[in-house]
Image: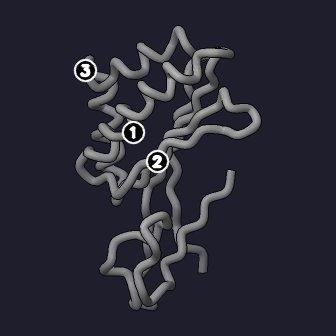
Amino acid sequence: MFFRLNTNRTTPPGGDKVAGPRKFYGNARARLVVFLRFARFRFKDGKEGDGLRILQAHAAAIRAAPGCLNAWLGQGQHPATECVVIAVFQDEDSLRRLEGRLRSDPTRGGDFFALLPLTTGPPEVIPYEVREIG
């Protein structure tokens, strides 16, 4: 999996691109560090529709979490039974707080339990620290 963050832009990108907080635009000395949460789900054949409905609500809840810069839901093309939820957080503490809430709050963490009978196995959830190379 390949993710690229461009922090050297002097103007904000389009709405579908990730570049980080605006305070970094045009500041050549600034180093952007963000945290990426990547969750992959593999659905059983025929269960994609039910799974996508749950994941849409899950991605919206993550997007609304404090410190989350944005979150996206993606569905695989080949195979269409594979989906990912990708979220970008401004700092590691925000990501850890979300993970804690997902584990301790049944209303937020219930998404994972509702997905278990629809998937071929437990989801892969991996946090990444994304740093500017240079």
Q: Eyeballing the image, is 97 above or below 5?
A: above
Query: Is tag 3's residue or tag 1's residue first in the polypeptide sequence?
Result: 1
Which residue carries the number 3 mark? 107
Q: Secondary structure at mark 3?
A: helix
Residue 5: give x, y in percent of width and height.
Answer: 54, 69
Give the distance between the C-alpha atoms of the residues marked 3 and 1, in whole angstroms. Answer: 14 Å
Q: Which of 3 and 75 lies nearest the eye of the viewer? A: 75
Q: Eyeballing the image, is 118 above or below 38?
A: above
Residue 1: give x, y in percent of width and height.
Answer: 68, 50
Whether residue 91 appears in this view of the structure is yes
Which residue carries the number 2 mark? 72
Residue 9: give x, y in percent of width and height.
Answer: 48, 85
Mark 3 against mark 1, which lies toward the viewer? 1
Q: Which of 134 and 79 lies nearest the eye of the viewer? A: 79
Give the distance between the C-alpha atoms of the residues marked 3 and 2, in whole angstroms. Answer: 20 Å
The amino acid pointed to by label 2 is: Trp
Residue at figure coordinates x 46%, y 73% from the top left: 14
Say whether marks 1 and 2 touch (CB < 8 Å): yes
Crowding at dot 3, Cα within 10 Å, few <14 / some 14-19 / many 20+, comes out as few
Q: Secondary structure at mark 2?
A: strand
The amino acid pointed to by label 1 is: Ala
Q: Which mark is residue 59?
A: 1
Query: Is tag 3's residue or tag 2's residue first in the polypeptide sequence?
Result: 2
Q: Eyeballing the image, is 17 above or below 40?
A: below
Location of residue 77 by image quarter:
top right
